[in-house]
């Protein structure tokens, strides 16, 4: 999202909707506990922080220890985005739990939040890449993922994202159930897209057109990639590439493999054609070939045509032909 686009969301007329100004209450951050972290220490704090504010020097930190059940969906999104990017033909970038910060006039953090994953469809150029995301002056990620394994971002954190002008936030409640999660929260993913300064729940992603919330949830939670997920990634990547005029051949990694595959295919085609020519020559001389001749011929490698023809004219059997060619290959 551009600076101009989210500057409009942060205009003075929208300040009254800003949940930053509400008193900080631990009940607004289910699954978290308050922890005092001084302003001078917040930049060095290494724990999981849902939210921190300078006015009270209070952070809301996640109660549950870090587990694979929580971490897996966010890391999986990075991998899934890589497949979509390859099909599109241009890179995407996921930056994990990078700090999302609003700074004061002195350049010190005023508020800070951490998402479980942030994703850029078009990564900022190196000269614009910063260690933290400046909510007011930087490029906002196209997608933010929040994994509500033991938390609930809907109460206070999602309204903060809305007030800050984030274009799209995914909230995934994983299939794996945390001990503290209420039974009323079923596993599913909700796509929240910003329209007119407010979030609305959408059936499909705006950043990844056609990728449904149901498909995203399945892709983030399945243990091995299903055929349905593979098809969805290809569909979404192809659609994004069509809009940009790019495709798989524009991805260096895929292009390399495709070039190697095409080269192998051409080599196999040449070998098959040479085998067919030799078999016809032997047949013309009354020498029958067995069904295994093709495989045994392939083992001869790239012998010159003259050696193959010479052996076919001198031999009295398939076995002798292969023996003569083997001698030529060794010699």
Image (spheres, rainbow, N blue to C red):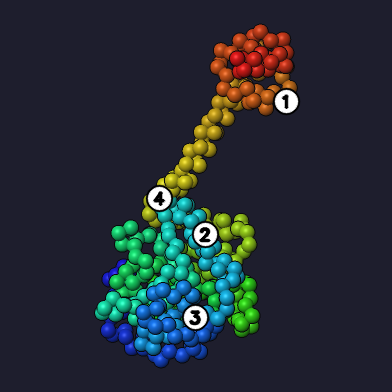
Secondary structure beneath label 3: strand
Provide the residue designation for mark 2. 80
Q: Residue drawn 62% across and 64% down? A: 222
Q: Nearer the viewer, mark 3 or mark 2?
A: 3
Few, some or many residues within 10 Å of mark 1 (<14, 14–19, 20+): few
Provide the residue designation for mark 1. 291
Q: Is residue 120 above or below residue 65?
A: above
Question: In the image, residue 53 lies at what x, y percent?
Answer: 39, 83
Secondary structure beneath label 1: loop
Provide the residue designation for mark 4. 246
Q: Are marks 1 and 3 in contact (CB under 8 Å)?
A: no
Q: Is residue 215 above or below residue 62?
A: above
Q: Earlier in the sequence, mark 3 or mark 2?
A: 3
Number of numbered discs overlaid on the protein picture: 4
Provide the residue designation for mark 3. 61
Q: CA distance from mark 4 to mark 3?
A: 42 Å
Q: Is residue 51 above or below residue 68?
A: below
Residue 327 seen in render? yes
Question: In the image, residue 185 lies at what x, y percent?
Answer: 59, 81
Q: CA distance from mark 4 to mark 2?
A: 18 Å
Question: In the image, residue 140 lies at what x, y percent?
Answer: 36, 69
Left or right position of 106 against 155 = left
Q: Residue drawn 42% across and 55% down? A: 91
């Amino acid at each position: 999202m551009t600076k101009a686009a989210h500057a409009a969301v942060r205009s003075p007329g929208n300040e009254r909707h800003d949940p930053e100004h509400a008193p900080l209450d631990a009940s607004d951050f289910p699954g978290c506990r308050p922890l005092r972290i001084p302003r001078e220490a917040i930049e060095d704090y290494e724990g999981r922080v849902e939210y921190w504010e300078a006015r009270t020097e209070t952070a809301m930190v996640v109660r549950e220890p870090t587990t694979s059940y929580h971490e897996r969906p966010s890391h999986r999104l990075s991998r899934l985005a890589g497949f979509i990017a390859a099909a599109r033909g241009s890179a995407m970038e996921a930056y994990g739990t990078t700090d999302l910060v609003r700074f004061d006039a002195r350049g010190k953090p005023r508020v800070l939040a951490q998402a479980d994953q942030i994703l850029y469809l078009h990564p900022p150029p190196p000269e614009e890449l910063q260690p933290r995301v400046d909510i007011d002056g930087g490029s906002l990620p196209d997608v933010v993922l929040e994994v509500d394994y033991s938390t609930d971002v809907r109460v206070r954190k999602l309204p903060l994202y809305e007030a800050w002008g984030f274009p799209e936030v995914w909230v995934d409640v994983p299939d794996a159930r945390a001990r503290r999660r209420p039974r009323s929260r079923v596993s599913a993913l909700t796509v929240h897209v910003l329209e007119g300064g407010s979030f609305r729940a959408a059936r499909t992603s705006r950043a990844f057109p056609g990728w449904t919330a149901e498909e995203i949830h399945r892709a983030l939670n399945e243990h091995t990639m299903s055929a349905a997920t593979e098809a969805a990634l290809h569909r979404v990547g192809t659609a994004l590439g069509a809009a940009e005029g790019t495709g798989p051949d524009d991805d260096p990694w895929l292009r390399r493999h495709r070039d190697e595959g095409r080269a192998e295919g051409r080599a196999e085609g040449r070998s098959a054609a040479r085998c067919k020519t030799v078999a016809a020559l032997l047949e013309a001389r009354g020498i029958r070939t067995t069904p295994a001749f093709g495989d045994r011929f392939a083992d001869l490698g790239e012998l010159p045509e003259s050696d193959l023809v010479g052996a076919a004219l001198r031999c009295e059997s398939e076995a002798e032909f292969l023996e003569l060619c083997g001698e030529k290959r060794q010699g």
